[in-house]
Amino acid sequence: MSDGSKLNSRRDFLKSGLIMISTAALPAEASRPPQSHTTPEATHYFSEAERKFLQSAIDRLIPSDERWPGALEAGVVNYIELQMAGPWGRGELVYRHGPFRKGSKTQGYQLEYTPGELFHRSINAINNIFTERGTTFSELSAAERDDYLTKLETEEIDLDGVPSNIFFDFLWKHTVEGFFADPIYGGNRDKIAWKMIGFPGAYTDFYDLVDKHGVEYHREPAGIGDGPMHMHSKPNQGKG
């Protein structure tokens, strides 16, 4: 992707500052997670052709490298499917009344489509474009996919009523969310994103470490679905 694009490499991505957004702002848009303590699996909200596009696209937005898996291995497509099939994707959490007019950059999302409809319309329009060319997006080389994603990001190609830059923004944000969110939302498989950045997860306290200084922290990150995050070995300590 171009020098101005949001992601060229894992190192550039980590320097981008988007980690704070993805780990802190997710629940405002995400569907309520299921009560199960296992990673939820999507029920194929997208068609096979749509899934192939998403897999090929997110694989370039957050690619794997010699040390760490990327968005594809982290199950980000599964995360996006769950979100689009839930209240957020159905538009239950966004304002859905007109008038619908093109707004300024400061006005946020202005289209009449639900997030799920936006994904369907945009991806199918892209797939139709490549079908007319006798190929598919997933068959392109990595460099060619990068170039096309850059066009989606920087231009306003009409994707069946959805400007491509708006679709790219949705795709990018959901890819970041799915990569860094708690696994209970369906992405961040095996907590690989948290392990990559050294995020400890959803521990409620660090009682056993408060008196340790200047030592490296080594502990598997914990998710919301992993049960109690900490049990004091001396529960009465500190009480009168």
Image: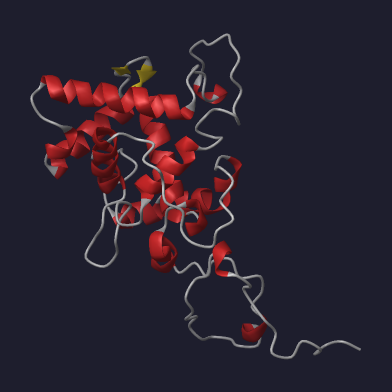
Q: Which residue sits at x=54%, y=43%? A: 30
Q: How is the image coloured?
A: secondary structure
Q: Can residue 51 be seen in this snapshot?
A: yes
Residue 30 or 8: which is nearer the viewer?
A: 30
Q: Can residue 182 be seen in this snapshot?
A: no
Residue 165 or 219: which is nearer the viewer?
A: 219
Q: Which residue sits at x=21%, y=65%? A: 66
Q: Is residue 213 left or right of residue 38?
A: right
Q: Position of residue 112 (x, y in %)?
A: 50, 16
Q: Is residue 8 left or right of residue 102?
A: left
Q: Which residue sits at x=57%, y=8%? A: 99
Q: Please, which residue is most extreme toward the left here?
A: 134
Q: Is residue 85 left or right of residue 145?
A: right
Q: Is residue 232 above or below residue 125?
A: below
Instruction: Name which quarter of the figure residue 213 lies in.
Output: bottom right
Instruction: Name which quarter of the figure residue 51 lies in.
Output: top left
Q: Please, which residue is most extreme toward the right here?
A: 240
